[in-house]
Image: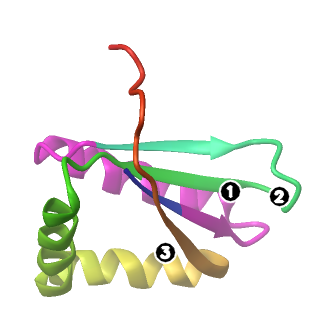
Amino acid sequence: MQRVLIYPRLGNVQEMQQHLESWVQAAQGQGRKVGLAMQAFAPEGVVFVITVRLNDLAELEQLRQRNRADQAFRDYLAKTDSLSRHPQKLELLEVLVPLPS
């Protein structure tokens, strides 16, 4: 599982939320296993969390290659960066016991 933590600037929280919701919904429409959450009580303020479920590291590498070649993804990143108060934080986790469906 890959998690991306995104830190919106004060005053840009609503715009960032709409931007991320739109991107996640489009990605889900393409069959990607991606979700969006918000850390409402984070000590550093509002933090959005995009979670991408992957089967293995090979799938992660394929995703990264696709994203590098995708102009729409680069545009998404540029807008995300313009609304952020500091760079995104990427985390890669191994799921030991998955949540039940």
Q: Magenta stretch: residue 6 in it?
A: yes
**Residue 36 location (% of width, % of height):** 46, 44
Q: Which residues are magenta?
A: 5-33
Identify the residue position indicated by label 2 in the image.
45
- Front position in the image: 42 or 29: 42
Identify the residue position indicated by label 3 in the image.
80
**Residue 80 location (% of width, % of height):** 49, 74
Q: Secondary structure at mark 2?
A: loop
Three-letter amino acid code at the position of disc 1: Val
In three-dimensional space, the C-alpha distance between marks 3 and 1, rounded to whole angstroms, equals 13 Å
Q: Secondary structure at mark 1?
A: strand
Asked which quadrant contains residue 44, the reply is: bottom right
Three-letter amino acid code at the position of disc 3: Thr
In three-dimensional space, the C-alpha distance between marks 1 and 2, rounded to whole angstroms, equals 6 Å
Q: Is residue 40 left or right of residue 26?
A: right
Identify the residue position indicated by label 1 in the image.
47
Viewer-nearest of discs 3 and 1: 1
